[in-house]
Image (cartoon, helix red, strand yellow):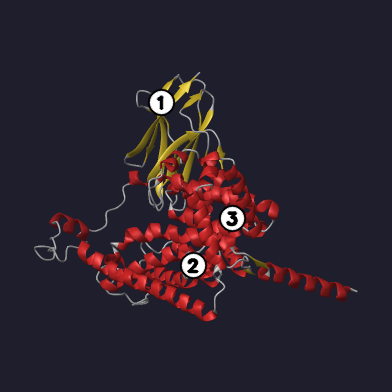
Amino acid sequence: MDASIDHAETRNLKASLNDFFYSKETPYGLALVRIFLPLILLCVIVPRWSFARELYSSDGAAAPLALTYQVMNFPPEPSGTLAVIMMSVLVLSLICSSAGWFTRTSLTVSLCLYTYISLLDSLSTMTKYSAISSHLLLILALSRCGSVWSVDSWRAAKKLRPRFHVWPRRLMQLLIGLIYLGAAMTKLHTGEYFSSDQLRHWLMTNLNHHNPAGEILSFYPEIIIAMANIAILWQLIFVFVVWRPWARFLILGMGVFFHVSTTPTLGLYIFPCVMISSYLGFLSERDVRLCIVGGRKLFRRFETLRRLRSLNVVRSFAEFLGRTQQGSDVSASAKRAAWLGSFYAWATILFCSAVVGVAAEHSLDPYKQRGADGPLPLRPADPRLIARLNEPFETIADIDLVLSLDVGSSTLGGVLLDLDDEYRRDEPFIVQLTLVPPHPDMWLECNLLDPTGITIHRAGQVVSREQLRANWNYQIPGTLPVGTYTLELRTADRVLVTRPISITE
């Protein structure tokens, strides 16, 4: 009896896995990823085109990722002209991928060139989103994402909607889910993430781009801690819950909100767009059809759009498409000749893009190698700059190690919450110092000075190098006169920071 039950359960598991990976659908979700992902990458590639010789060739200052692992000349650095050709072809192949013209070939070319140039520039081009984008391009190249909403599908003019195995979309979904799971597992081993220290430093800096909302948010550690815990919980459960129909759009909606919020808080732009575009791979055929039906209903509500639809131009275009589809029933030899002609046009355009790119770079002459007076001469460096670079490293001043000195009455996870500068007599409060890592072992005092500058309370402690915070607990005596007092943070020989505090009745 038990053996038969086990056999039935095994058969059901195999059937479920087979249906999960090999059921058939029209790849609308993958087509949407194919349309938007190359356009997003173009926002990065096009501005770097004029710097191709500098970033990706032996003529400039390429920084291959393999150098980090002491591997030389991998991948080989191309010449300056070849780097310009690669970037020019990459731009056009990304456009062809988005349009769906020879989709699989265009995606393969984009994958190879984008990965190659990313490996050549580990300082700026090689980022988290470039690694994720390379994997997404690989999955798209293996799929039939060009069978709908593409030039290829328009040329094929098939009356029936094509249906293919769903496994490429499942691979994309598993990739995104496992990326989030790996990120969460890394954060679980980072105590500074949960105490808001790591996020607070990111919010306060403009390492990526200008982030004014992040600087404001850094003053509210309770919000940072709550967001950090919600984010890691969401990353942990994503790959396990996103398959549930009732939870899928909730989880994806939280992901969209999370990534969009990183733009004003952390200054990220391309990474959120790449991740949100990958979410389109979670849309099933039914989801897309429901969106199309809803869009049509919305379309019918607008009188102007209905009139536009009734124009003769639109009717003529629809009739032309209809004639194209009716005339698709031609011989195999004619189809082969048409395919070869289209492929010849595609290859010719790619070749012309390389030629035009080299000619444009030659005429623009961004490095002034062919100026009227010849190549620009190298300017001698400022002697003062040379002397400064040759000096021994300066010791970091103690004041530069202080991030903030805050006053409050309660903590959450060791972080001071309710910041204030005014307290009543007999009311306890906490003074918290936050340091910038790394720092040496330090002896620090936090003294309370009266309005005349006389020290009325002195408290010191050793702050070891692994500590990022130090707390001093104060209990204001009831006999202390009302007034404005000063908190003084100092070492044994100098004052670092002062902060006023008001004592009231």
Q: Position of residue 383 (x, y in %)?
A: 13, 57
Q: Amino acid at mark 1?
A: Tyr
Mark 3 or mark 1: whose residue is earlier in sequence: 3
| SS type, badge 2 | helix
Alpha carbons under labels 3 and 1: distance apart:
46 Å
Alpha carbons under labels 2 and 3: distance apart:
23 Å
Q: Nearer the viewer, mark 2 or mark 1?
A: 2
Residue farthest along the left direction in this orientation:
373
Quarter the N terminus occupies: bottom right
Residue 84 shows in the view: yes
Query: Label 1, on which residue?
Result: 485
Mark 2 or mark 3: whose residue is earlier in sequence: 2
Mark 2 or mark 1: whose residue is earlier in sequence: 2
Q: Residue at x 31, y 47 (%)?
A: 397
Query: Label 2, on which residue?
Result: 137
Q: Position of residue 234 (x, y in %)?
A: 60, 52
Q: Amino acid at mark 2?
A: Leu
Toward the viewer: 188 or 330? 330
Query: Label 3, on which residue?
Result: 235
Q: Position of residue 278 (x, y in %)?
A: 53, 59
Q: Residue at x 53, y 43 (%)?
A: 307
Q: Amino acid at mark 3?
A: Gln
Q: Nearer the viewer, mark 2 or mark 3?
A: 2
Q: Check contact, mark 3 vs mark 1: CB within 8 A.
A: no
Q: Is residue 60 above or below residue 504?
A: below
Toward the viewer: 471 or 142? 142
Q: Check contact, mark 2 vs mark 1: CB within 8 A.
A: no
- The disc label shown at residue 11, or none: none
Toward the viewer: 348 or 126? 348
Q: Quadrant of residue 499?
A: top left
Q: Nearer the viewer, mark 3 or mark 1?
A: 3
Q: Residue at x 69, y 54 (%)?
A: 245
